Image (cartoon, rainbow, N blue to C red):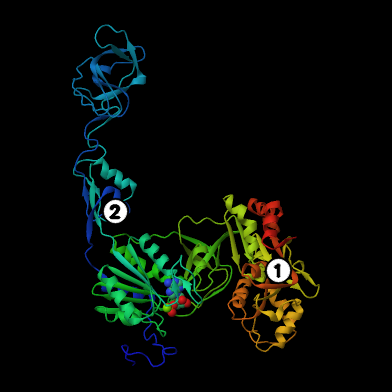
Amino acid sequence: MTNIFTPKPNPSVEQDQFLTILSREEAIARFEAALFPRPLPSETRLLADALGRALADDVTAPIDVPPFDRSNVDGFAVRSADLARAGEGAPVRLALNDETIACGTAPTRTVVPGTATAIATGGPVPRGADAIVMVEHTQPVGQGGGNGAIEVRRAVSPGQFVSYAGSDIARGEALLRAGTIIGSREIGMLAACGIAEVAVARRPRVAILSTGDELVQPGEVLRPAAIYDTNGAIVTAAIAENGGDAAFLGAITDNEATLEAAMREALADSDMLVLSGGTSKGAGDVSHRIIARLGKPGIIAHGVALKPGKPLCLAVCNGKPVVILPGFPTSAMFTFHDMIVPVLRRLAGLPPRSDAKVAARVPVRIASELGRTEFVMVSLVEGTDGLIAYPGGKGSGAITSFAQADGFLKIEALADQLPAGSEAEVTLFTPHVRVPDLVIVGSHCTGLDLVTAPLAHAGLVVRSIAVGSLGGLAAAKRGECDLAPIHLFDDKTGTYNTPYLADGLELVPGWRRMQGFVFRQDDTRFAGLSAAEAVRAALADPACIMVNRNQGAGTRILIDRLLAGSRPDGYWNQPRSHNAVAAAVAQHRADWGMTIAPVAHASGLGFIPLAEEHYDFALVTARKQRPAVQAFLDALASQEGRAALTAAGFRPA
Ligand code: AMP
Ligand code: MG
C-alpha cells in the first residue's frame, strides 16, 4: 500500500484503485446509519421568514377564531323567535335599535323582542340576537319616530348567517403538526391566531467547494485549457432547493495543503460539506485523502455501483456529512439527487421529495452495464399510443443532457439492457413537464434554432433531439417525431436526401450549407488555394494535422472523397460536430478540417468553400396537419425565417 501522506513518485500515471465498490443501496444504508437518528436543531422565525420551513413543534391555537359570534352578511341582527310566523303574506315589523354594528365595533345595545340591530359583515352579534337576516330580505318602513323599522317576510332559523366563536379554529385545538412545511396557507392559519413567530427546523448550513486547477468562475475570462465551474453553481442551487442554507466558497486548486485548509475552515462553520471533483482516485485527486484526517468515522463509501456517478465519496466527520461528488456535472447531479438530497432533507426536517413519475415506452434498446444502477436521461415525446422516452444523454460530462431532458429512468443493477419497446417509469425533473408540441429528431443545425424561434416565442414547446440524419430517419419511419432533419448524400444518384425517403414520409426542402476547408487565417500554406488544392497541399506537408468527422456524417463522405484513400495524421480524430472541428483547428490541435461556413466564420477561421450540402426535412405525412407542424412550415417559408437563415450564412432552398 502506498503511503498517502508522501508525494507519489509518478503522479501522472499512478492511481489508487476503488477497492470496494458498494451497491447504491448499501452505500445509502451505511451513510444514513452513520448520521441518524440525530436531534433536529430548531430556531424561532418570524412568520414572514418561515415560508418553506418545517415546523419544529406542534402549534396549538391560543385563541378562538373567530373570537366572537360573527355576522356573515350585511343585514340585521334579530331574535329568530320574533320571525317564526313571518311569511310573504305575513310581514313582521321590527323596530331598529339606535346603533349600527360595523366591523370592529363592539355592540352596546341588547336586541330585545320585537327589535333588530343593523350589522355589517364581520360585525359581532349583539346580546339577545341569535340570527341575521340579509338586508336584501328586508323592507325599510315608515320613520314612525326614533330609529325607524324594518319589515321581514320570511322566517329565519336560529344561527342563520352567524359564525360562532371558535367555529373556524377552537382555542386549544392542534393547529399544525411538527414537520408541516409552512406554505402561505399555514402562514394564514398562524396569523389568524395572532401567532407572530414559530419554531422551525434550522436550515442545515452547507458549505460547497469545487476542486480543480482547471476551474474558472462564471463571469471570469476562460483561459486556455480551463472550463467554467458548473458544479459550484448547480450544487449550490440544488442545496437551496432542498432546504439547505448553501454557502458556495469557490473553487480550490488541486493542492493538498490548500484544499485541506479550505475544507477544515468550511467544515468548522457548517453542518455539512459538499465538494465536487477530485474523487476519481486519479493523480491530483486529493480530497478523499484529506477526509481521512478530518474526523471520525471518516469515509463510509468511496466508489458506488452507479452510472453515472461511480466515484462518489460519502463520509461522516465528527457527526457532519462530508460528500465528494464526481467532477462531471451530470454525474454530480445524479448522485446528488439520488443519494445526498434524501439526507439533506432529513437534516432540514423536510419530508422526502415526491417526484412526479410517468409511464413511457422506450423506442430503442438501451444497453446498460451489469452490476451498476444506471440512470438514463430521457426526453418525452407523444407517440401514437402514449408517451415515448428518448434516451437523450450526451454522457456524464454533458450539462445539457440535464437541462434538456424531461426526466430520467433507472435501469436496475442486475439488468444489462432495456430492450426496445419496454415500458419504463420516468421520474420527471419537474412536475410541470409539458410534452412538446413539435418534435424534431435528426441532425442538428444552428439554422434550426432560427426557424423554430418564432414558435417558441408563440408559446409552442419545440423539442429537438440530435441523433444524426440516419437516427432521425429511423424515428420518422416509426412515427416518433414530426420532422427529421437530414443531409444524406446518395452516391448512386448524386443527389441529396430524396432517395432516402420511405412510405409515409415527404421531403420539405430546408436550406443549403456551404461546406468547405477550414484553417487558421494566419496559416499561409492554404492562402489563395481552392479546396481541392488546399487538401493536396495539406497532404504534401507531413507536419500538417487534420481533424476528421465521424463515420456517417455527411461531411465525412466529402472528406473521404477528397482524401482518396490516404490517411494523414489526425484522420482518426473523428469528432461528431461541426463546432468540434472548428475548435480543434482554432486551438492548434489540428491545422485543417471540413466544416460549414457559418461555424468557420463564427470561430474566426479561414474558409475555402467546396460544395453545398442540402439540409432538408423528412416530414411524417400523417402529422402534417398538426398545428405546430404547420407553424414550423410557415416559419420556414416566411420572409423573416429566410432572412434570418441568410444572415447566419445559410442559403434557404
Ligand atoms: P475529477 O473528478 O476532478 O477528475 O473531474 C472529472 C471531470 O469533471 C473533469 O473533466 C473535470 O474538469 C470536470 N469537473 C470537475 N469539477 C468540475 C466543475 N466544478 N464544473 C465542471 N466540470 C468539472
Ligand atoms: Mg479535478
Q: Earlier in the sequence, mark 2 or mark 1?
A: 2
Q: Is residue 532 above or below residue 347?
A: below
Q: Residue at x 25, y 79 (%)?
A: 297
In the figure, is residue 520 to the left or right of 62?
A: right
Indicate the quadrant of ligand 2 in the picture. bottom left
Q: Residue at x 25, y 58 (%)?
A: 201
Residue 114 lies in quadrant: top left
Coordinates of residue 132 in the picture (x, y in percent): 28, 24
Coordinates of residue 375 in the picture (x, y in percent): 47, 71
Q: Which residue lies under the disc numbered 1?
A: 487
In the rendered view of the protein, which quadrant contains the C terminus?
A: bottom right
In the figure, is residue 377 to the left or right of 186?
A: right
Secondary-structure class at tag 2: loop
Q: Residue at x 37, y 91 (%)?
A: 8
Is residue 413 visible from the viewing direction of this image?
no
Please, which residue is most extreme toward the right here? 493
Q: Nearer the viewer, residue 623 or 393?
A: 393
Amino acid carrying label 1: it is: His
Is residue 332 visible from the viewing direction of this image?
yes
